[in-house]
Image (spheres, helix red, strand yellow):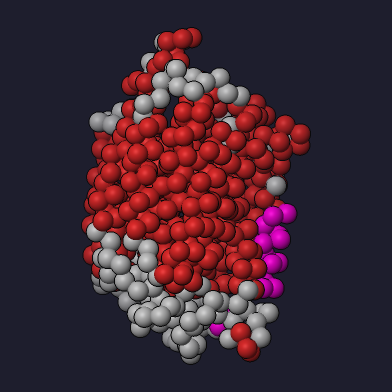
């Protein structure tokens, strides 16, 4: 493969249009869980199987977590564009099948297939962003990613409520089809990556896939069941924890011995910024999962908000995410400096979650909104910068595996966080609590959750201080590493 000269000017304007197609595909996975969550009460009334309802979410989450690193490595080994398109097709086929399900068992199976496709959407989407745009120039496009994530969090419950109420629960899955088809055609027409250089037949790391799949499965199930289905000290949770620890050790040994490791050790050891970025993204996952689950619950139960507006309740947090992501991205692209943003972001996250930890039955919506705004500012400064930090720490050949790792650890961090939160909340809110006592118990449980979140954010602040600011690839003084090469369908020779 030949490489283009190092680009010191902004990428061509049509990159933005190409990225829009990639973002549309990523939006599918971000919207899906929120839409389906809103539709689940109707699904249960139609299909029955209330005792299996948790598996509709667990099957999706588990399949996504297990498949994400596999998709990332496939993108590195084969043609990244084609692998991404394949994940979209699988996701759309599974959406069609899930919408046509006639039993809870069928729905769970098709949700698992959806999760496999979603793993490719997450890993492939961020890897394509890393391939299309050098880190120095990536800040110009951070607002797009932040806007998509905000739309997924806020728009999911709203879309889910509308389509379920007017068209039926099956359209909670069918709604993916028009958006996915547009993304599929858009990417097919607009995105043209160079053909990979001819090489010998890639060796698939089957041992790594098997070990990592078992390890991630045990970790996700332990996080899902601990403190709710089973006690933290039950033999089932302890056994799953042991499998997770043992599997991690075995996976590390396997990856050091195979020729094409699923998650190359060099990704984690090549530069200290990569594991630091992973730590920051784990904190982001904990904050986002905690806020998305417990802020609407607090505002509905304690402050009397309606469930139908649950998505809008997060706007005070999500609007600052979009604004600060744009500001930080433009400053980073102009100056090449970026360490200040995760440092400031984690500081704001700590302050915001501490503010949310003070909420009680007398807290006004304005006061709660101010705490949410602080969290939003912190997320905007931290989330995309941590991803850029990870992308700048690896070579292009490992971009898929690296982005798969970041998404995997963010998901696992959020899952473990939710498990801990659920345990804290259950202890604070007894089943016998009713009326005013229940409102006070929910407020008390919410305080515990955000106090624990503040502790995680404080640790992330320390990690941000340890980040080493190195020149971003694609700008003056960029480090001499392999450069992203793109060939867009609409580029002219002068653009290249």
Q: Quadrant of residue 157?
A: top right
The residue most toward the right is 166
Residue sitting at x 46%, y 34%: 370
Check residue 181 for magenta coloring. Answer: yes
What percent of the width, then of the height, locates residue 433?
Answer: 42, 11
Q: Is residue 52 above or below residue 176?
A: above
**Residue 99 shows in the view:** yes
**Residue 5 part of the magenta-drawn span:** no
Residue at 65% across, 68% down: 17
Whether residue 422 can be seen here? no
Is the stretch drawn in magenta largely helix, strand or loop? helix
* Nearer the observer, 168 or 147: 147
Question: Is 97 left or right of 117, judged from the image as shown?
Answer: right
- Please identify the quadrant where the C terminus is shown: bottom right
**Residue 446 drawn at (x, y percent):** 39, 26
What is the magenta range? Answer: 178-194
**Is 465 drawn above or below residue 396 in the view shown?**
above
Q: Is residue 160 above or below residue 138?
A: above
| Residue in front for this viewpoint, 128 or 231 | 128
Please give the name of the residue rendered at 64% of the width and 49% of the height, measured from the top-left corner.
Answer: 95
Q: Is residue 1 left or right of residue 246?
A: right
> Picture coordinates of residue 277 (x, y %)?
34, 59
User: In which quarter of the view is residue 233 placed?
Assistant: top left
At 32% from the left and 38% from the top, the residue drawn is 454
Residue 396 versus residue 197 in the image, above or below: above
């Amino acid at each position: 493969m030949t490489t283009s000269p190092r680009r010191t000017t902004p990428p061509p304007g049509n990159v933005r249009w190409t990225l829009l197609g990639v973002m549309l595909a990523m939006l599918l996975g971000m919207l899906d869980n929120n839409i389906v969550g809103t539709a689940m009460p109707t699904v249960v009334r139609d299909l029955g199987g209330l005792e299996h309802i948790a598996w509709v979410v667990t099957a999706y989450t588990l399949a996504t977590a297990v498949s994400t690193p596999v998709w990332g490595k496939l993108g590195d080994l084969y043609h990244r564009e084609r692998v991404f398109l394949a994940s979209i097709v699988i996701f759309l086929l599974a959406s069609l099948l899930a919408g046509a399900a006639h039993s809870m068992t069928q729905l769970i199976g098709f949700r698992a297939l959806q999760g496999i496709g979603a793993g490719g959407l997450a890993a492939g989407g961020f890897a394509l962003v890393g391939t299309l745009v050098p880190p120095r120039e990536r800040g110009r496009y951070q607002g797009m990613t932040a806007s998509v994530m905000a739309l997924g969090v806020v728009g999911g419950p709203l879309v889910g409520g509308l389509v379920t109420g007017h068209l039926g629960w099956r359209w909670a899955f069918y709604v993916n089809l028009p958006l996915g088809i547009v993304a599929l055609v858009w990417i097919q027409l607009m995105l043209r990556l160079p053909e990979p250089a001819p090489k010998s037949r890639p060796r698939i790391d089957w041992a790594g896939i098997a070990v990592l799949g078992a390890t991630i499965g045990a970790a996700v199930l332990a996080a899902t069941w601990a403190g709710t289905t089973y006690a933290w000290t039950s033999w089932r949770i302890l056994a799953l924890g042991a499998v997770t620890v043992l599997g991690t050790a075995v996976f590390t040994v396997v990856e050091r011995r195979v020729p094409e490791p699923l998650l190359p050790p060099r990704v984690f050891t090549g530069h200290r910024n990569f594991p630091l970025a992973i730590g920051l993204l784990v904190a982001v996952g904990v904050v986002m999962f905690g806020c998305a689950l417990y802020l609407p619950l607090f505002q509905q139960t304690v402050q009397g908000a309606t469930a139908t507006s649950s998505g809008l309740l997060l706007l005070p947090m999500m609007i600052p995410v979009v604004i600060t992501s744009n500001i930080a991205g433009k400053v980073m692209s102009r100056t090449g400096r970026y360490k200040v943003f995760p440092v400031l972001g984690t500081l704001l996250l700590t302050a915001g979650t501490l503010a949310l930890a003070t909420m009680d039955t007398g807290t006004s919506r304005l006061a709660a909104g101010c705490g949410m705004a602080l969290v939003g500012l912190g997320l905007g400064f931290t989330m995309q910068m941590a991803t850029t930090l990870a992308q700048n720490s690896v070579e292009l050949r490992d971009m898929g595996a690296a982005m798969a790792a970041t998404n995997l650890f963010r998901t696992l961090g959020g899952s473990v966080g939710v498990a801990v939160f659920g345990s804290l909340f259950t202890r604070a809110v007894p089943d016998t609590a009713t009326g005013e006592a229940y409102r006070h118990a929910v407020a008390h449980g919410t305080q515990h959750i955000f106090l624990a979140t503040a502790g995680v954010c404080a640790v992330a602040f320390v990690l941000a201080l340890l980040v080493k600011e190195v020149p971003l690839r694609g700008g003056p003084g960029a480090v001499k590493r392999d450069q992203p090469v793109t060939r867009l369908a609409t580029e002219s020779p002068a653009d290249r």
